[in-house]
Amino acid sequence: LVLSEFKNNKHFYIESYGCAMNFSDSEIVASILAKQGYGLTTNIFDADLVLLNTCSIREKAEQTVRMRLTNINQIKKQKPGMLVGVLVCMAERLKSKLLEEEKLVDIVVGPDAYRSLPELLEEAEGGQKGVNVLLSREETYADISPVRLDNNGITAFISIMRGCDNMCSFCVVPFTRGRERSRNPETIVQEAHDLFSRGYREVTLLGQNVDSYKWKGEENQTNKEAAVLMNFAQLLEAVAQVNPLLRVRFSTSHPKDIGDDVLHTIAKYHNICNYIHLPVQSGNSACLERMNRTYDREWYLNRIDAIRRIIPGCGISSDVIAGFCGETEEEHLDTISMMQYAKYDMSYMYYYSERPGTMAAKKYADDVPLETKKRRLAEIVEVQYQLSLQNNLDDIGKTFEVLVEKTSKKNEEEWCGRNQQNKVIIFPKGNHKVGDYVNVYIESANKATLKGRVVGN
Ligand code: SAM
Ligand code: SF4
Ligand code: F3S
């Protein structure tokens, strides 16, 4: 969908916080609003409607949004009639609290209620508050064609499922995004086809736990007994077959569910990128048990070994939490040794932030002192720094296939792209253009980027 296809009477402005799922959801919201005559503006002062697509994953994430809301309310005072809405995770966690106690917003919309936006806007325009935070077991927005907001025209997200059934004890997502449900694979493949025909060259299949994707047919989706007609490995294969020039990525994999079938499918198709984001959270079995991750250290080590065996040269990255409830110094050291074993290319690293209502908040004391959490996190960050640097230095002298994405931020004369392993690679532009695949010989590296020159094209 292209926004200019719609008549725009009014304008909306949207900011997205949190994970890729939120950014992808903003594109669904943009599509629904476009049909209501709302055009996109990137200038908040031009907006009739300001939407914040919010995240609750850590306390800090919520604080950031609250500060932004206070700030937006100052703008609103100068622009009477401007409506402010909060979408998704904070909407779900705080519900009408945001409307009543804090009076900062006019509409509050949960992740399964975007279709009701037109009515909610009408209510808000009439001076009432518009709230819909009902969660659904079926909604996947399968029929909605997203408006691409992050418009480089080359890479796009495709949401393949929603919600999460895992109940990791630290995590608020099952509460904010509801039950896991998979999207009709035909609509996923169709979306990939459409993107390819419009010039896109990379899609990332999104879900909180992509390996548990299962399609049982429209009627049987919520029937536990019904046979699975398509699993994640089969879906990956179907999307890979759209075109050999369309790169396929996916996120996030769950260590308990990523099977060898998925690994063999990645190995079989050149255009499925050799890169897996496999969050470990902790390297210690007792801590993993308290986290309710449902795998232990041995299991995770086995998955790393399987990746290395089946997909040689595969990039691996992770999420790590420092200072979870009851974490001892030995448990922390197990996380560090796990990182060194897995040789992650990159990790998202956080210290534990207790979330009200989660199993951990109910069951365990948040007993690791903040100082200790911060010190452990700093140690984890340092280990990852060394691993990223060493992995990148090891790439010097290798040649990688790179998809050209954009001009390098630092130098107009250079392109920026990524290899299959998701590493950023910078090289002189030559005659190449955005969307091309080129082979780049790596000549130098730091912890964040590889630099090289095009060979043999
Ligand atoms: N579904 C993915 C998974 O299972 O790995 C991603 C979940 S979440 C959107 C992204 C990351 O935030 C998690 O992997 C975890 O490391 C981190 N996280 C979640 N809850 C947290 C909390 N209460 N405190 C600190 N970090 C947290
Ligand atoms: Fe949260 Fe765990 Fe679900 Fe990931 S798998 S979203 S960490 S509950
Ligand atoms: Fe945050 Fe919600 Fe994603 S809590 S990380 S935006 S699913």
Image (tube, rainbow, N blue to C red):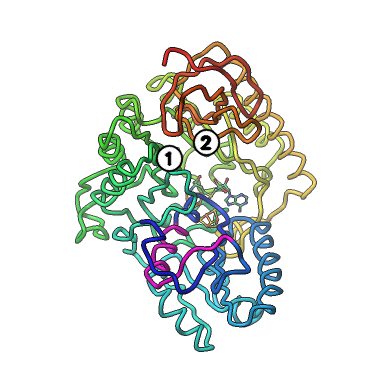
Looking at this view, is 380 or 123 the one in front? 123
Q: Nearer the viewer, residue 326 or 39?
A: 39
The residue furthest right is 371
Residue 437 location in percent, x, y? 41, 26
Q: Please indicate whether residue 400 sits to the left or right of residue 409 in the image.
A: left
Q: Quadrant of residue 242?
A: top left
Give the amino acid type for the residue marked by disc 1 in the picture.
Answer: Ile
Q: Is residue 301 visible?
A: no
Question: Is the stretch drawn in magenta largely helix, strand or loop?
Answer: helix
Residue with the mark numbered 2: 406
Magenta stretch in the rendered image: 25-42
Residue sitting at x 61%, y 60%: 355
Q: Position of residue 241 (x, y in %)?
A: 25, 34
Name which residue lies at 34% across and 34% down.
246
Crowd tier of the residue under label 2, counting other residues whose Cα lies within 10 Å: few below 14, some 14–19, many 20 or above? some
Residue 35 within the segment the image draws in magenta: yes
- Name which residue lies at 29% across and 48% down: 214
Q: Nearer the viewer, residue 131 or 289?
A: 131
The residue at which mark 1 appears reads as 154
Callout 1 crowding tier (Cα within 10 Å): few <14, some 14–19, many ≥20:
many
Name the amino acid, label 2: Lys
Q: Is mark 2 within 8 Å of ligand 3?
A: no
- Quarter of the image for the C terminus: give it: top left
Q: Earlier in the sequence, mark 2 or mark 1?
A: 1
Say which quarter of the image contains residue 205.
top left
Q: Which mark is residue 197?
A: none
In x, y percent, where is residue 212? 35, 46
Q: Which percent across, then down, holds residue 183?
A: 30, 54
Task: Compare residues 256 and 209 and report the one nearer the observer.
Answer: 209
Is there any visible trace of residue 318 in the rendered image? Answer: yes
Report if the CB atoms under discs 2 and 1 are less than 8 Å apart: yes
